[in-house]
Image (tube, rainbow, N blue to C red):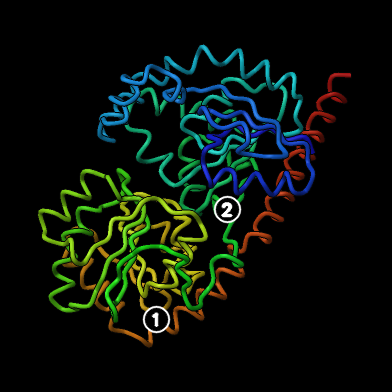
Amino acid sequence: MKLCFLVDARSTIARNWIKHFISREHDVHVISSHSCSSTVLEGGQLHQVPIAFGGIERIDHGVASTLRRLDRLTKGVLRSWFTPIDLLPHVRRIRRLCNEIAPDLVHAMRIPYEGIMAALSVRSAPLLLSCWGNDFTLFTSSASDRFLTRMAMRRADALHCDCEKDVRLAREWEFSPAKPSIVLPGAGGVDTSVFHPGEPRLNGLRLEVPEAARVVINPRGMRMYVRNDIFFNAVPLILREEPRAFFLCPGMRHEPAAEKAVRDLGLKDSVRLLPTVGRAELAELFRLAEVSVSPSTHDGTPNTLLEAMASGCLPVAGDIESVREWIEPGVNGLLSDLSSPAELADAIIRGLRDRELRGRAMVHNGLLINRRAEYKRVMAQAEKFYREIIDRMQANAGRFQKAIQ
């Protein structure tokens, strides 16, 4: 197959998905919506068309630094206002690229804004759109975003979601139920050769974890839809009941809000704010921890949730519809109402104290991940789905030709 992906090629999620098709020796072309290294996807042909502030790395250094310091809410407002204007100049260029590539299928791996751009640009190939958890909720706050999302859903020939919830929502956003859809983990699933239970090998990671600590990990980083305020305010409540609890927070070092919370709540002896870590290092942190926390209020299926489950770490997550597709409370994890720190603290304390639950969950989640989220199985389904979309479109084109003859 000749495939064209419209993605942010800096994304490890997108690269993890695309590398399967490169390894299978398909003819892979990638149009990146953000500036990136030319070597991010070896074996594929990379084209860069930065859209929606995607070229920020190339603009004046002082301006770029100022924009990077803006809080996430401010940047979200700027994107809602200016992205529709920014998209239009790129339509002709992406359409020309797609015509030159002549792919059998175009896959845009997120609705805002790669999917919207693809819907405006792609005319000569079937279009598959992916939805990642917040595309129909958090990122449809402005009238322009809502208009563009509906337009993209009407144009899409097929849909990939990482949870059943978003297939239902897509129909509300005018994606036809007659068109094909599939539910698969967004990053292509979990590499169980990396994420699995066992003794951690920290390989030089300087964590300074106290001896006999009960480790809890929050791997979500700083995102608009993750209630890290609730998480940090839960930590003192947990320490009162479990003084040996110790908290690791990858992706939060040098984040002002996280540093302020640790400072104001007096948590520096019990919390480590870590830099963003690679997949191998993250897997070791999951094996070190007993409990993994995902305090999100909007989400699809978080990749870190699946990776924690695969690594034998008990998941504690916000009680939202998409996460209930994976976690049955008290069976293979715990869900928490994130309306108060006390609710989350109670769930984490239970996770630390209930050794039997952790043991049952490890076995249950290992089987669940192998059945529904193991990388090779997931990507085999994705490849089959691609072929079905192409065959369907070719058959429809053939019937149309016969009808007009």
Q: What residue do we see at 32% from left, 58% from top?
A: 249
Q: Which residue ends up furthest to the front in the rendered image?
A: 204
Classify residue 102 as left or right of residue 376. right
Residue for badge 2: 183
Q: Is residue 137 above or below residue 297?
A: above
Specify the label residue 286 is tagged with. Answer: none
Q: Position of residue 246 (x, y in %)?
A: 26, 70
Front residue of this view, candidates 220 and 157:
220
Few, some or many residues within 10 Å of mark 2 (<14, 14–19, 20+): some
Q: Is residue 2 above or below residue 360?
A: above
Q: Is residue 277 above or below residue 127?
A: below
Q: Is residue 384 above or below residue 150?
A: below
Q: What residue do we see at 28% from left, 83% from top?
A: 353
On the rendered image, what quadrant is the C terminus found in? top right
On the rendered image, what quadrant is the N terminus found in? top right
Where is residue 218, by image quadrant?
A: bottom left
Residue for badge 1: 358
